[in-house]
Amino acid sequence: MITVGTVPERLARNRYAPDGQSHIQVDQDRARATGAAALLVRVCPAHVYSEAPDGTLAVQHAACLECGACLAVAPPGVLRWHYPRGGYGIAYRLG
Amino acid sequence: MPSTNEPVDFEVIVVGAGIAGCVAAHELARLGHEVLLVERAAEPGAKSLSGGVLYTRVMDHVWPDFASHAPVERHITRNSLMFLNEGSRVTIDYADDRLAEPVNAVSVLRAPLDAWLAERCTEAGVTVMSGVLVEELLFDGERVAGIRAGEDVLHTRVVIAADGINSFLCRSAGIRAAEPAANLALGIKSVVGLSRAVLEERFHLIGDEGVAYAVVGQPTHGLPGGGFLYTNRCSVSVGVVVRLDELAASTRSSVELHDRFLAHPAIHQLLAGGEPLEYGCHLIAEGGRTMQHDLTRPGLVVVGDAAGLTLNTGLTLRGMDLAAGSAIVAANVVHAHLVTCADDVLAGYPDALDRSFVGRDMRTFAKAPHFLDNDRIYGPYGRLLADVLHDAYDLDTSPRRHLVRSGLAAVRRSPMSLRQLARDAALAAKDL
């Protein structure tokens, strides 16, 4: 085990102002057609994305660190991604 | 010109209270303009993240003796370039008293730093509005005339887009398209707390001194990128940066790269007993000069990360000083525009940027992305260096050879040819 623990343990130490409204929307048909799930699961450092047993792409938007990497690698049309509403989301204390 | 007569809410609206936004807002307020600085985080700094080493000399132009007043962490007086392999490492360690006086580079944590910068803006007369996400630019014909945030509409003569690497402001207005993944890198970072005494003993630091490690090879599994470790006052910032397109095309995950770097014995022992404090990530511009396009429109200038201003020379990774530099240029251009009311003044921003140290350095290292797009840097060279040194130090009673001969033998054993080596050396001389 490395010093900093698992991803959920790391995120639990971060400070968030959780937004009830998700800032990430998935077009599941596009995701399935393009096989984007596996890619997004690998790229996201916060483990926002997971592949559900039925093959759909599950999103835990509250974990998001708002870097934008998912949007940059996702095939066109798979994600609708914008920043959370003002004041919500990750709130770095150190940064 | 219509915009000069119509009433506006603020002469200038700056979107994003990072380094670029704060410096631009501060300079324009100091020149006597009414400036609004809008930030989506609840407090300035709470969305900011960088590695981060800040080369401070440019900041002294805005806040004299910046490093003595701003909440910086340590003065970087030692730089270590480490070729890290699974079971070996070769380090070029450069320490120099001249890097201490005058202060050249400091480690920073952006949340406290950016909060301090925003306070300086308030002090200078800037109206700082936090917790507000600007959703789009408003146009009057071809001219950018304001911003919309939710129901709120604010009119201005100039918008300065300092909204970071994703710059949705420019993207949604069709001014700058989304960058291809090949022009981006993903940085993943942990901040690990250590007591001041342990940290200074472990890294051989006295007083404010700090060290910056750049690590090549093992951290990215051979993918273009590297690891970093910077000492803060009572913590270290440690993580990896990897080219986004290469990560996407690989079978690796971003978390896996971060974790195996931190778990490498050479790094693990530097973190031993530390308390994990924070985990974050950020995109980095890696496209170099190709990203400095569409930096102005009537009523708009683009600065900092939003303008793709990051420079990876292999030895230094710069972004924050270029952000500040572009903001100073932008502030002067916007000031001249507001005084003369001539549109071609704003249009001169890219040229003015080009003439500044920002543009000059981007030009000097225009081919650095090309040089760094070479897989041999991210594994084979580190192993080759270790092999040559192994031959020199591993005295197994077999007859020794001169260093050059054992070097040639090591090249023959490596997956590289002498021709490739010569070509890479020539490229390094030309591109870096």
Image (cartoon, rainbow, N blue to C red):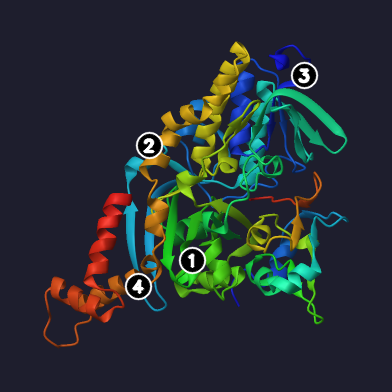
Q: Position of residue A67 (x, y in %)?
A: 66, 55
Q: Which residue is mark 2?
A: B101
- Answer left or right for A66 relative to B99: right
Residue placed under numbered mark 4 in the picture: B380
Q: Residue B98: x, y in percent?
A: 33, 41
* Separation of residues labelled 2 and 1 (CA atoms): 27 Å
Q: Which residue is mark 3?
A: B8
- Mark 3 or 2, which is nearer the eye? 3
- Are callouts 3 and 4 both on one chain? yes
The amino acid type, in three-letter code, at marker 4 is Pro
Same chain shared by disc 1 and disc 4:
yes
Q: CA distance from mark 3 to mark 4?
A: 59 Å
Quadrant hosting residue B333: top right
**Residue B123's x, y, as percent?**
67, 24
Residue B65 shows in the view: no
Give the residue type that dot 2 points to: Glu
Mark in the foreground, 1 or 4: 4
Query: Chain letter of disc 1?
Result: B
Q: Are marks 2 and 1 in contact (CB under 8 Å)?
A: no
CA distance separating discs 2 and 4 = 37 Å
Does B53 sit above or below residue B83? Answer: above
Q: What residue sits right under mark 1 in the picture? A: B270
Dot placed on the residue nearer the N-terminal end, 2 or 1: 2
Alpha carbons under labels 1 and 3: distance apart: 55 Å
